[in-house]
Amino acid sequence: MIEAKARYIVGAIKHARVRGAGALELRPEVQASAYGKTQRSIRKAVWVSGGCRSWYRSTDGRIDTLWPGTTVSYWWQTKRFKPGDYRVTEEETASGTV
């Protein structure tokens, strides 16, 4: 999974360089949607439905540290950087102007 994430990050860096971006910021609606899907999927996992108590669970019972799918599904989801999911902030010059 680390290789898939590294490839995605390289895609983000390349996109930022081409655009002259100072930063890429994940759109809040994209983050909320992805988080919701992850939480719905993880409900089926033994860590949640099996009655397990572990360090993975927060005090309110959520699990934010595990991927609920297969490695292949993670690879597929991170196969290519998705520029539309991000806001681009223009790079500032040394004088502080764009």
Image (cartoon, helix red, strand yellow):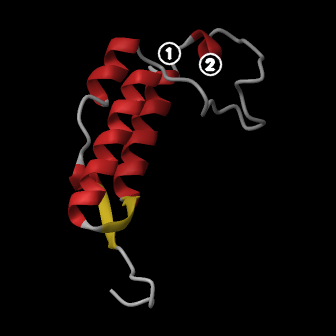
- What is the quadrant of the N terminus in the image? top left
Residue 1, labelled with which disc? none
Say if mark 1 contacts mark 2, CB within 8 Å.
yes
Which residue does the numbered mark 1 point to in the structure image?
44
From the viewer's perspective, is residue 50 above or below residue 76? above
Image spot of residue 40 (x, y percent): 45, 29
Disc 1 and disc 2: Cα gap in Å? 7 Å
Residue at 37 percent across and 60 percent down: it is 24
Image spot of residue 47 (x, y percent): 64, 15
Q: Give whichever of 41, 68 is nearer the camera.
A: 68
Q: Give whichever of 19, 1 is nearer the camera.
A: 19
Residue at 42 percent across and 17 percent down: it is 69
Image spot of residue 62 (x, y percent): 64, 33
- What is the quadrant of the C terminus in the image? bottom left
> In the drawing, does residue 59 fall left or right of residue 71?
right
Which residue does the numbered mark 2 point to in the structure image?
48
The number of callouts visible is: 2
From the viewer's perspective, is residue 24 above or below residue 71? below
**Helix, strand or loop at disc 2?**
helix
Residue at 32 percent across and 18 percent down: it is 73
From the viewer's perspective, is residue 22 above or below residue 11? below
Q: Give whichever of 52, 78 is nearer the camera.
A: 78
Image spot of residue 68 (x, y percent): 48, 20
> In the drawing, does residue 60 fall left or right of residue 28?
right
**Helix, strand or loop at disc 1?**
loop
- Looking at the picture, which amino acid does disc 1 mark? Lys
From the viewer's perspective, is residue 97 above or below residue 82? below
Q: Residues within 10 Å of mark 1 (few under 14, many from 20)?
A: few
- Looking at the picture, which amino acid does disc 2 mark? Val
Q: Residues within 10 Å of mark 2 (few under 14, many from 20)?
A: some
